[in-house]
Image: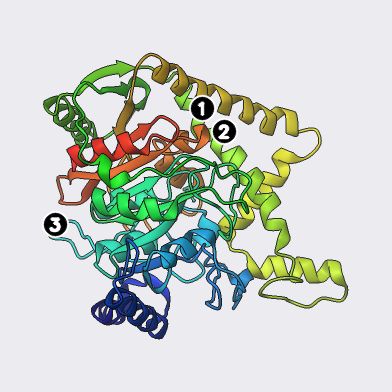
Amino acid sequence: TQAHVDAVAAARELNAYVLETPEKALEMARASDERLAKGQGGTLEGIPLGVKDMFCTEGVRTTACSKILGEFVPTYESTITSQLWRDGAVMLGKLNNDEFAMGSSNETSAMGNVINPWRAEGSTENLVPGGSSGGSSAAVAARLCLGATGTDTGGSIRQPAAFTGIVGIKPTYGRCSRWGVVAFASSLDQAGPFARTVRDSAILLRSMSGFDPKDSTSVDLPVPDYEAALGRSVKGLRIGLPKEYRVEGMPAEIEQLWQKGADWLRDAGAEVVEISLPHTKYALPAYYIVAPAEASSNLARYDGVRYGTRVPGRDVTEMYENTRAAGFGAEVKRRIMIGTYVLSAGYYDAYYLRAQKVRTLIKRDFDLAFEAGVDAVLTPTTPSPAFAIGSKSEADPVEMYLNDIFTVTVNMAGLPGISVPAGLSSDGLPLGLQLIGRPFDEETLFALGHAVE
Ligand code: GLN
C-alpha cells in the first residue's frame, strides 16, 4: 500500500486520481495486516484499489467529476465498494471520469483530462485513456493501483480497458448492485472491475457481485467462483463473429486483430462461425436516445437543494436555473436537452418508444444466436486505438459517439462483455478484443479471455 501511495503521488501529471486518501489507505492496510496476523481475512486482503468517482464512499468526497456535486461527502458507502472492503481491499483514492460518466475520452470531466500512460511509438503526443472510466484505466495501466472499479453504460469499462492495454469486464445487468453508484442511465448502467489480467478481474468481480435487497434490479443468483473458470477448456465452444461488425471504414489492423483472435480461439479448440446480428446498425442511434432520456430524468435531482453546489437566485426557480447552468458541463447539458426532448409529449412515441422497440430487437438478435448454439460472440472492442487529447471536434459530438459502436449493443441487451488486450497497433498502441456472453455466463468469458490474453 505504501508503495502504491508513493506511486500515486509521483504520477500526478496523469490526473488519474481526483482525490488521494493515503491516510485511509494505510489505516485499512494496517487493519488488513491485523486480520491476516490472526489467521483471518478475505480474498482481497491488503490489495490497493482505486475507486471511480461515480461510487459513493462514506466520508470521502464523491463528485461524479461534476461541478454540481461540489464538495459532496456521502454519508453512505456503495454496496460494491463495501463488498470490496469487506473482503480486505484497501482504498487509495477516487479516480477521474467523464462528467456523470458521459463520454468516451475523459475530456468531459470537470476535473480535467486524464493522460493515457501509453504513447504512439516515437511520439510525444498525449493520448486519451478512453472514457468514461479514464482515471480507472490510466491508474491500472500505470500501476497506480492493482485494480479499480468502473461503470459501463455504453462501453465505459471496455473501451478504456482496450485503450490502455488492460482487462475490463461489464457483467450482466443485475449481476452487481447499483446501490450507491451515481446513476446515469439506470437500465444500462452496470459496474465492473479493471485489472491487468483476466485472473485479477475474475477475483475482483466475484467480490463485487451478488444480490442486494437495496437494488431491485440486482439478481438473486449465486455468485460463481470466477477464478476457477479460468481453468476451463474452451474446446468445443462455438464462437460467433457477427458480420455486421465489419463496419465501413474499419482500419485493416482492427480487422486483422479480429481474425487473429478468431485463430487463437480456433487453435484452442473452439469452433468459429459467422453469425448475423441484423439490428446492429440501429444500436448506436437507439442508445443515444435511451441513455439521454434516462439521464435527463436521473439528473433532475441536482437542483441545488439536496446536494453540492447552490447558486442563489431571486426565487426558487431562478435558483434551480442558476445552479444547473453553472453546475453542469456542456456534454451533460446536451444529454439533458436530448433526453427531455425525446420524452416530451408528442415526441415520446416517435423517439423514445421507437428506441425501446429497437432495443428489444437488438436483444432478440443475440437471443437467437445463443439459441442457435453460439456460446460467445467475438468482436473488436473499439474501431481505433487511443486518439490524441483534443483531436475529436467539440462541434461534432457524433464523431465521439461513434467510438461506442461495438460496445453499446451489449448494454442495450443487458449482456456480459469483456475486453482483453490482444495486441498492438502499427504505431505500438494497445488494441482490445471483446467477448460477449449469455446472460449471467461471465464464466465462459473468463475462460475465453484467458485463452486470448
Ligand atoms: N461513451 C458512452 C456515452 O457517452 C458510454 C459511457 C458509459 O458507458 N458510461 O454515453
Mark 3 or mark 2, earlier in chain = 3
**Which residue is situated farthest in the bottom direction here?**
23
Mark 1 near mark 2, Cβ–Cβ under 8 Å? Answer: yes
Element under label 2? helix
Q: Position of residue 115 (x, y in %)?
A: 32, 66
**Which residue is situated farthest in the front direction here?**
38
Give the spatial CA distance, label 1 vs label 3.
36 Å
Label 2: few (<14), some or many (≥20) within 10 Å?
A: many
**Which residue is situated farthest in the right direction here?**
315
Give the spatial CA distance, label 3 vs label 2.
37 Å
**Residue at image x 78%, y 78%?**
312
Element under label 1? helix
Q: Quadrant of the N terminus?
A: bottom left
Q: Quadrant of the C terminus?
A: top left
Label 3: few (<14), some or many (≥20) within 10 Å?
A: few
Q: Which-is-in-front pick, marks 1 and 3?
A: 1
Label 1: few (<14), some or many (≥20) within 10 Å?
A: some
**What amino acid type should be assigned to the residue bearing mark 2?**
Ala
Q: Position of residue 132 (x, y in %)?
A: 44, 55
Mark 1 near mark 3, Cβ–Cβ under 8 Å? Answer: no
Q: Position of residue 122 (x, y in %)?
A: 12, 60
392 left or right, relative to 72: left
Q: Which residue matches tag 1?
A: 282
Question: Above or below — where is 46 with respect to 254?
Answer: below
Q: Which residue matches tag 3?
A: 121
Q: Which residue matches tag 2?
A: 286
